Image: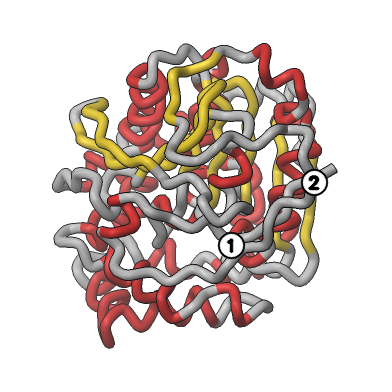
Amino acid sequence: MAENAPAFAEGYKEVNGVRLHYVEQGQGPLLLLLHGFPEFWYSWRHQIPFLEQRFHVVAPDLRGYNLSDKPQGVSQYFMEKLTGDVLALIRAFDAEKAVVVGHDWGGVIAWDVAAFHPEAVERLVILNAPHPKAFLRELSRNPRQIRSSWYVFMFQLPRLPEWYASRGNFEMLERVFRGWVHRKETFSEEDIRLYKQAMGQPGCLTAAINYYRGLFRAPGAFQRLRRYPKIRVPTLLVWGEDDRALTIELTRDLDPYFEAPLEIRRIPGCSHWVQQERPEEVNRFLEEFPFLSKRSDRLQASPGRRGTGPRRSSSLPFTFCRARPRSKAFERLGHLRWPACPAQPRP
């Protein structure tokens, strides 16, 4: 990537009764990047410079996270609310549909949007987030998945989860990020500091845990799962095989849940934090999936933001490296020093 890589623009949208913060880059069809727990938009820092070559990329802080609003009460984090945020965000960018990419909780929300509102999803990409019916299936028969899901049940308790997660200056965050990955260089000291800073925003930790509490407390939640529609949009499922929270069995026997093509890409020796630990492979899988082919220019375009740098031709080879951010979004995260990136190879 060139030295003068484009900055990430940032903004806010009032959607579905909350004010969501987001970063954006690029022009073209709308593509949403939905982060998971305990992250924020920053988890997509390796994908945004790649995807903005063909898309208007928008990476929001989900409700309750980082700089987005943090409404109080578990009911504010029921699935219908979370799905409604995504649908309203698509409309807020003057689009009828979007490519929806989600990791972890962002993937859970993306599954729900695609299942109940397929008209709003052009393509679906899921990273280490189980299909809800597959998750229930494995909880009913897989002791290893039951053991791995202990935290889901612990999070149902009042106050204790917040104390456990925040003690020792959010030591838990460093443990789950650095302790789970195979590539120890995946998360720098600065990365960990930024995640702690985001989770330390007033009300953020309780809001994030309320996602889990809402799973069991939403009226009719289990009935809704029983009538969960089949997925009717083309889907790519990317999975780090050494996920300590989600077993590999969650990627098997998925055909009964689909009426559209499903492509599964597994990455051996990779943790739950798949797009951060193995960004080169994830970006390659995205490029190989049909929605990133030249056919993507036939999708509906949203206005987008070009940023300050030149657009890269889709015909140029892509050399992966970190973006060199210069936006206010990054300034709010503190002083970052990014390594120099090699120039793009020329044909």
Circle 1/circle 2 CB separation < 8 Å: no
Mark 1 vs mark 2, CA separation in Å = 27 Å
Query: Which quadrant would residue 28 be assigned to in this image?
Result: top right
Foreground: disc 1 or disc 2: 2
The residue that appears at 40% across and 36% down in the rendered structure is: 221
Determine the residue positioned at 71% across, 68% down: 270
Q: Secondary structure at mark 1?
A: helix
Q: Label 1 is placed on what type of residue?
A: Gln
- Residue at which label 2 appears: 346
Type of the residue with mark 2: Arg
Secondary structure beneath dot 2 equals: loop
How many marks the image carries: the answer is 2
Placement of 342 over or under 21, stated as above or below: below
Toward the right, the furthest residue is 347
Q: Which residue is mark 1?
A: 276
Query: Is residue 138 shown above or below 169?
Result: above
Coloring scheme of the render? secondary structure
Q: Nearer the viewer, residue 56 or 268?
A: 56
Whether residue 226 is visible: no
Q: Give the residue drawn at x 43%, y 71%.
A: 337
Q: Residue at x 53, y 15 (%)?
A: 301
